[in-house]
Image (spheres, helix red, strand yellow):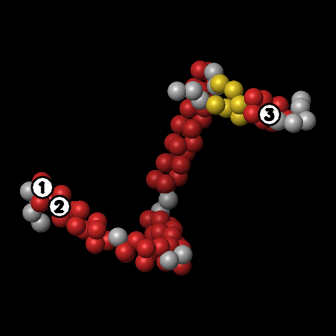
């Protein structure tokens, strides 16, 4: 699979117009490794941030997200599909012989 990388900033200084050929090129293996390493570091940082976040803060964040969803009308839309989801779980449990 080819990976495209934008380098429009470097091209913008040399050309008045940006054609599709001038803003995208194949990423080299070294650039792909660097890209992957940068994202690995970002993901490590985010994971550590989440680990260090106190439960009280996480609960407040969850409450804010829930309230935003309620304000946007998502709870009603999600509730509309609950019966279908419950039926799917019932069928799965039945097929797998799970008794609760």
Q: CA–CA distance between discs 3 and 1?
A: 57 Å
**Residue visible at 87% across and 36% down in the picture:** 17
Q: Label 1 near label 2: C-beta < 8 Å?
A: yes
Q: Left or right: where does residue 99 sit relative to residue 75?
A: left
Frontmost of labels 2 and 3 is 3
Residue 32, image quadrant: top right
- One can see residue 23 in this view: no
Q: Dot 2, how many residues are within 10 Å of its Cα: few (below 14), some (14-19), or many (20+)?
A: few
The residue closer to the viewer here, 66 or 93, is 93
Mark number displayed over residue 19: 3
Place of residue 43 in the rendered image (x, y in percent of width and height, measured from the top left): 52, 43
The residue closer to the viewer here, 95 or 100, is 95
Q: CA–CA distance between discs 2 and 3?
A: 54 Å
Q: Which circle's residue, 3 or 1, is located before the other in the chain?
A: 3
Question: Which residue, given by chain and number where applicable, does mark 2 sit on?
Answer: 91
Q: Label 1 near label 3: C-beta < 8 Å?
A: no
Place of residue 36 in the rendered image (x, y in percent of width and height, measured from the top left): 56, 32
- Farthest top residue in view: 29
Frontmost of labels 3 and 1 is 3
Q: Left or right: where does residue 43 sit relative to residue 23?
A: left
Disc 2, SS: helix
- One can see residue 73 in this view: yes
Q: Which circle's residue, 2 or 3, is located before the other in the chain?
A: 3
**Residue visible at 59% across and 29% down in the picture:** 3
Question: Which residue, given by chain and number where applicable, does mark 1 sit on?
Answer: 95
Q: Dot 1, how many residues are within 10 Å of its Cα: few (below 14), some (14-19), or many (20+)?
A: few
**Residue visible at 32% across and 71% down in the picture:** 82
The residue closer to the viewer here, 96 or 33, is 96
Place of residue 22 in the rendered image (x, y in percent of width and height, measured from the top left): 78, 29
């Amino acid at each position: 699979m080819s990976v495209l990388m934008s380098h429009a900033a470097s091209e913008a200084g040399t050309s008045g117009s940006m054609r599709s050929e001038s803003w995208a090129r194949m990423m080299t293996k070294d650039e792909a490794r660097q890209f992957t390493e940068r994202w690995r570091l970002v993901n490590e940082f985010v994971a550590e941030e989440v680990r260090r976040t106190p439960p009280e803060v996480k609960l407040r964040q969850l409450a804010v997200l829930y309230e935003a969803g309620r304000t946007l009308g998502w709870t009603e839309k999600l509730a509309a599909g609950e019966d279908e989801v419950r039926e799917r779980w019932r069928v799965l449990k039945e097929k797998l012989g799970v008794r609760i």
